[in-house]
Amino acid sequence: MIHILTTGGTIEGLDYVDGKGITQSNVTIQSFLESANIDFDYTIKSVFKKDSRAITDEDRAQLVCKINESAATKILITHGTFTMEDTAKYIGKLNLNKTIVLVGSFILGSSAETDAPFNLGYALSSLQLLKPDVYIAMNGQIFNWNNVSKNLETNKFERNDQ
Ligand SMILES: NC(=O)C[C@H](N)C(=O)O
């Protein structure tokens, strides 16, 4: 059983334009999974719907509550890319003894060119194979929570020790 927690971000078609958050989107993580004909047991829950620049430590604490409440030991978190590494660190430091993978997209989930379905597939596959810890699955790579940064110039995630 995989438990999916959604938090907003570009992957859900949410973004900031002119300093204002766009909260209306016709994209759902569920619809991506349905179009891929996913055939394993999963549950999906929206924890909040925010551009990740607006996520606070209170939001992160709420996310941790949902992780702890879940009977699943494999958790996927969909999240905006800007502060994904902060949320990964926040959760990683807690040693929750579950496999937790965070994933997002660089191109709006509502756009035809979105990287969302590929990233979701890659993250869900990795989630089933990885040992308990917290990871980011982006750019076709797996990053450990304590060794990852988003490079704002290249718009890619990279290892800190690279
Ligand atoms: N690519 C993204 O997800 C950026 C987005 N605006 C965010 O929530 O961080």
Image (spheres, rainbow, N blue to C red):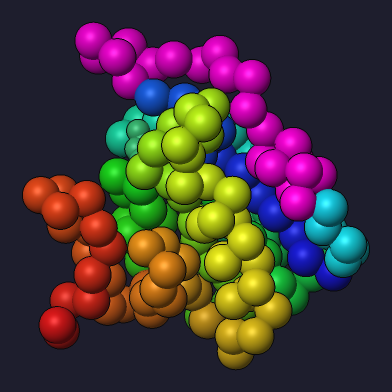
Q: In the shown orientation, is residue 14 left or right of residue 40?
A: left
| Residue 124, above or below 64 | below
State which region is magenta: 16-36
Closer to us: 130 or 99: 130
Q: Where residue 147 sits: x, y (%)?
A: 27, 78
Residue shown at 65%/73% (left/top)? 125
Closer to us: 48 or 114: 114
Q: Where residue 83 sits: x, y (%)?
A: 32, 48
Give yes or no for residue 13 being in the magenta stretch: no
Q: Where residue 19 sits: x, y (%)?
A: 25, 14
Q: In the shown orientation, is residue 129 left or right of residue 118?
A: right
Give yes or no for residue 22 being in the magenta stretch: yes
Residue shown at 57%/66% (left/top)? 123
Split into 4 quadrants, where in the image is the C terminus? bottom left
| Residue 48, above or below 156 | above
Q: In the shown orientation, is residue 123 left or right of residue 42?
A: left
